[in-house]
Image: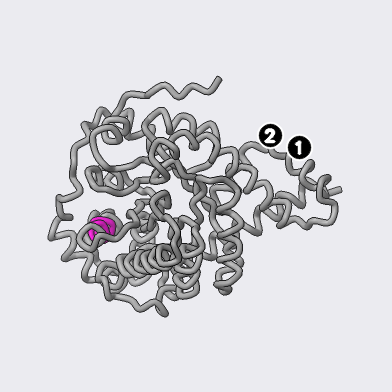
Amino acid sequence: MTDLSPTPGPLLDAARTTKTALWNDSSDLDELTKSISCGAVGATCNPVIAYTTIKNHLDAWTPRLRAIADAHPTWGESEIGWQAVKDMSVEAAALLKPIFDEHNGRNGRLSVQTDPRLHRDAAAIVAQAVEFSELAENIVVKIPATRVGIDAIEEATARGVSINVTVSFSVPQAVYAAEAIERGLKRREDNGHDVSRMGPVVTIMGGRLDDWLKEVVAREGIFFDMSALEWAGVACLKKAHAIFTERGLRSRVLSAAFRNVNQWASLVGGDLVVSPPFKWQQIINDSGYTAVSRIDEPVRQDYLDELNRLEDFRRAYDEHGMTVEEFEDFGPTRKTLRQFLAADADLDALVRDILVPAP
């Protein structure tokens, strides 16, 4: 029987005493079960995580992939691999369903990401988002915050899909995406549908913004206070949360791509979601840290002053720092899309090696 007894610690304290929701950054069932015991009420996933989960559990997934292939003899590697991802998602969603019912759809959701190879085709993204949303009642579907993705986000929302905006690293991406979700929700309401159980979230991958700015500083040989580079993502997350709260946007900000504990600790108290990998949850819970609300504490001004020396930070931090047309050319967007596309190729290769082993 699955053990979901509470695990005391800072994560559980924050989950019980603040509006800050903990989601697990993986749909691995073992990790998710442990994370739920720490107070987690949801889970996220992406192509890299899905591929890694299957690769790390080949003892379980090899026979399952072969069974999928046997049941669908005309399917190619990609169709077989994505069916495995869908099966994984349905199983993880079932684990979260009681939380979904308890929270009336706001939490208890499992994220499934649309195929990154569709990133140029809004209609294809929407069609797959609808398909994925029908896998289980508590699915939330990831769509990238690109020019094409923003259009798909609005349309999929209007069709009743709860969205988790991904490939998002900046305040302008978050605000544009949240406004697209608002338009979709309004269209759905105008058509007589109830949206009260929809649970959209807008991710800012704070750690990936930090990674990019560190890369820029190193590449350009800039004399820089490196400690400030640990705070760029947190600064954008705090600013986006403040804008969402002030404007009454119905999406919640989600903090992802963890690189340091401040990407959780500095956001505690906000009505938002934090989604660290389980290894980070273990670090936090073993720390003895006392969880306190820090969402309203500003990032140190000297860090902001240092970060503002970088054009790409200014683009990410200023609500109007980028147009929608510029999103897909932003450095972290290109880099992350390429990583997600590579993970798709890696999953295809893994399926190929199982079905057609090397001689």
Q: Nearer the viewer, residue 336 or 99?
A: 99
- Residue at numbered disc 1: 63
Give, as a single range, the part of the protein colored magenta.
235-241
Residue located at (78% from left, 57% from top) = 76
Q: On the image, which quarter does residue 201 sit in? A: bottom left
User: Residue 193 appears at what percent x and percent y?
Assistant: 45, 59
Q: Position of residue 355 (x, y in %)?
A: 81, 48
Amino acid type, mark 2: Ala
Compared across the picture, whether 224 is left or right of 357 comes to left
Residue at the image position 46 percent from the left and 66 percent from the top:
153
- Between residue 3 and residue 245, name the one nearer to us: 245
Across and down, in percent, residue 100 comes to 44, 39
SS state under label 1: helix
Picture disc at residue 353: none
User: For this view, does 216 lie left or right of residue 356?
Assistant: left
Q: Judge whether 14 appears above or below 217 on screen.
A: above
Q: Residue 207: within the magenta?
A: no
Q: Badges 2 and 1: C-beta atoms under 8 Å apart? A: yes
Label 1 is placed on what type of residue? Pro
Q: Which mark is residue 60?
A: 2
- Specify whether residue 218 is in view: no
In the rendered image, the quadrant that contains the N terminus is top right
Q: Secondary structure at mark 2?
A: helix
Count all numbered tags in the image, as a single digit: 2
**Whole-percent x and y of residue 264?**
30, 44
User: Would residue 56 be found to the left or right of residue 182 on screen?
Assistant: right
Q: From mark 2 to mark 1, how far is it between C-alphas?
A: 6 Å
Q: In the rendered structure, does residue 238 fall within the stretch colored magenta?
A: yes
Q: Main secondary structure of the magenta part?
A: helix
